[in-house]
Image (spheres, rainbow, N blue to C red):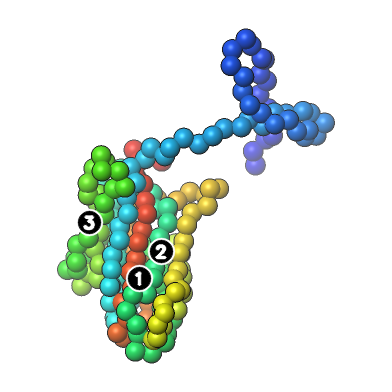
Amino acid sequence: MPTLSSLGYTDGAGKNIKTFSRSEGGTTREEQVFQLGEPSLPTYTCAVQNVATTTSASHLLYIQGDGTLYTRINWFEIQQQTLAGAAATAEIRVLRTTTAGTGGTAISCYPMDGGDTSPYAGAAMTLPSSKGTEGVLLYQVRVPILAAAPILIGGRWERQTYEKPIIIAPATTNGIVFKLITGIATSTVNITVGFTVSVAL
């Protein structure tokens, strides 16, 4: 458990620091005000469309490390694209992977800033016929799959400011996968993943 502490500061003749005063345990402390600058980490999106939901236990999408940098998954969204023959619920689990799959459709993930490395250097693929090795479960979502328009419902996860993102370590054997538990005939889904890359944790 961290220990509550404070840092003394003596005003000088230079620039002033903006603060708010508050009393804690009889001691007046200053809460410093700061303004966030523009984010600087290279930022990517991996967007796939019309991924078939036909096969149970299929890996709808996987994203692997790039071999050099830490890949930090900040958000993802799953939405139905094509109507199902009958209404159902898709259970999708996000798991770590320790090997990459093969035999599917390779996907390129592109940067939001055209000046960053393009495309993302790590592998991404939809529906590998030979699936990668699954690891621990990180997240699960149940998405309603509709048989009639309009399609308005999806599933979204976004990291909170008080928590780490989902981090993929640099090795190309490390990754995450979106696994469909029970197949649903006819329908397809779109998946979009937003992530950044960094040299260190």
Q: How far across and down, in percent of the image, does residue 148 sit?
A: 40, 86
Q: Give the number of the disc on residue 148.
A: none
Query: Nearer the N terminus, badge 1 or badge 3?
Result: 3
Q: Give the number of the disc on residue 77.
A: 2
For the residues marked 3 and 2, what is the alpha-carbon distance in whole angstroms?
Answer: 17 Å
At a point 33% along the width and 69% down the height, the residue shown is: 190
Look at the numbered disc 3 and give the secondary structure of its residue: loop
Q: How far across and down, in percent of the image, does residue 27 sit?
A: 79, 28
Quadrant where the N terminus is found in the figure: top right
Residue on which disc 3 sits: 108
Q: Give the number of the disc on residue 179.
A: 1
For the residues marked 1 and 2, what is the alpha-carbon distance in whole angstroms?
Answer: 14 Å
At a point 26% along the width and 51% down the height, the residue shown is: 110
Mark 1 touches mark 2? (CB < 8 Å): no
For the residues marked 1 and 3, what is the alpha-carbon distance in whole angstroms?
Answer: 19 Å
- Tell me the kind of residue under disc 1: Lys
Q: How far across and down, in percent of the image, does residue 102 sit?
A: 19, 65
Quadrant where the C terminus is found in the figure: top left
The answer to whether residue 178 shows anywhere in this view is yes
